[in-house]
């Protein structure tokens, strides 16, 4: 996510944080409850002095943990860069329960080559979700949203061009998510 920080700052205020295992230099992530608690702590700190709308954005595991947090804390939207819908390994299970329980609007930014989130599987899950969801597809993008060099060359583009389109999709989603809610009379 650090790579996206400067881009996202063009849309609004961005507060980044590291999970405890990262700060401690460990490779293995903590269990989900500890990750959610750390995410909640960062959200509470970010909200101090910020009366406006709040969206959570995360990459891979950070997006999944943000979704879990959104079940417990009110936020205005979620942006998931490379959501890990399917775990790794041959016995990997589908991580769809949290998505189907959400009521918070969500934007998925997914690459077509992302083995952790096959687009056909995501489409099936999105059809069962209660929350409004949007999908921005990065053609030939991997889990890190990097397009293949071949596709970039064929299109006469750079990764910066791809990233600019991703940022535009995120900006559109954020603009829709932070609209004032209509008052009921």
Image: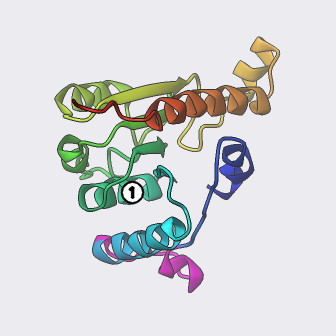
Give the side of residue 97 with respect to residue 85, left or right.
left
Residue found 39% across the figure and 57% down from its top: 66
Label 1's element? helix
Q: Quadrant of the C terminus?
A: top left
Residue found 35% across the figure and 75% down from its top: 37
The residues colored magenta run 19-32
* Main secondary structure along the magenta-highlighted residues: loop
- Does the segment drawn in magenta span residue 169? no
Number of callouts in the render?
1
Would residue 25 be seen by someone viewing this image from the given angle?
no
Of 120 and 100, which appears nearest the observer? 100
Of 34 and 87, which appears nearest the observer? 34
Q: Which residue corresponds to mark 1? A: 66
Residue found 44% across the figure and 71% down from its top: 44
Image spot of residue 118 (x, y percent): 37, 32
Of 177 and 156, which appears nearest the observer? 177
Give the side of residue 122 with respect to residue 171, left or right.
left
Image spot of residue 40 (x, y percent): 39, 70
């Amino acid at each position: 996510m650090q790579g996206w920080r400067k881009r996202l700052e063009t849309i609004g205020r961005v507060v980044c944080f590291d999970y405890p295992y990262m700060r401690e230099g460990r490779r293995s992530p903590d269990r989900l409850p500890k990750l959610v608690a750390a995410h909640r702590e960062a959200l509470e700190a970010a909200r101090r002095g910020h009366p406006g709308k709040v969206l959570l954005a995360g990459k891979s595991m950070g997006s999944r943990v943000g979704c879990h947090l959104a079940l417990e804390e009110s936020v205005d939207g979620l942006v998931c860069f490379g959501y890990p819908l399917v775990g790794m390994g041959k016995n990997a299970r589908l991580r769809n329960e949290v998505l189907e329980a959400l009521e918070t609007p969500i934007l998925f930014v997914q690459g077509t080559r992302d083995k952790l989130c096959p687009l056909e599987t995501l489409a099936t899950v999105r059809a069962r979700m209660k929350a409004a969801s949007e999908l921005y597809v990065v053609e030939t993008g991997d889990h890190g949203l990097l397009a293949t060099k071949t596709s970039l060359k064929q299109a006469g583009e750079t990764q910066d061009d791809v990233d600019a389109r991703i940022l535009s999709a995120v900006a559109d989603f954020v603009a829709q998510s932070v609209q004032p809610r209509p008052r009921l009379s």
